[in-house]
Amino acid sequence: MLKLFNRKKKDNKGFTLVELVIVVAILAILVGILAPQYTKYVEKSRQSADVSNLENIVKGFKVAAADTDYNIIPNGTTSAVFTIKMEASGTTITATGAPTKGTNDTNLYWEDAIKEYTGYDFSSKVEDLKLKSKKWRTTPAQGSTATAETAIEATVTVKPDGSVTVEYNPTSVKNGTAGPTA
């Protein structure tokens, strides 16, 4: 009898079907629990990358306003306002009240400063700087046919005395949350 028992034990190779089903069930439960957490962290890292890209451009304006080599500070009493808008299709900068380059002008202006400090030419839309996160909302959808705008913005105001103020839209850009979702 002992020989028969030892011989059966030697012939038993591999796992039973029940053991495999239990292992697969445990793995499925673990994936079901961990997958939502993983996607949440991926989205948070995308938002952090978007904020970092926007902050780098804002820092470029701050440095340019302090650099005397560039003509970025407006003359007179009005302020220069630069609106940086990051969308899924790229990033644009619009300037209001900023000194502009003349035809025979050799001075360096905000476009030159931002190109030097960020490495991007903002004379047109920069398609290399796109939003990575789809969760940003600058304007919530109004009505049944409207869609919310997916973008983040920074408005940089340079005053004649050289001081710089920055406002963000949505205001949640500073803390990395996606803002209004409606």
Image (cartoon, helix red, strand yellow):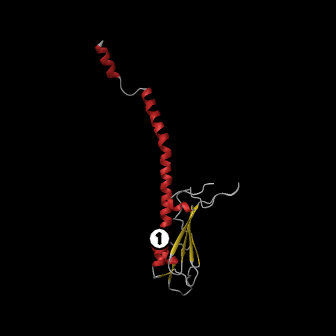
Give the quarter of the image for residue 16: top left
Q: Position of residue 171 (x, y in %)?
A: 56, 62
Q: Position of residue 85 (x, y in %)?
A: 57, 67
Q: Position of residue 25 (x, y in %)?
A: 47, 33
Residue positioned most to the top: 1
Q: Is residue 22 above or below residue 54?
A: above
What residue is shown at x 54% (from left), y 78% (from top)?
159
What residue is shown at x 34% (from left), y 22% (from top)?
11
**Residue 119 in sight here:** no
Q: Quadrant of the C terminus?
A: bottom right
Q: Is residue 10 above or below residue 41?
A: above
Label tally: 1
Residue positioned most to the left: 3
Residue bearing the label numbered 1 = 59
- Hey, what amino acid is under mark 1? Lys
Q: Position of residue 180 (x, y in %)?
A: 60, 57
The residue nearer to you, when weighing 129 against 152, is: 152
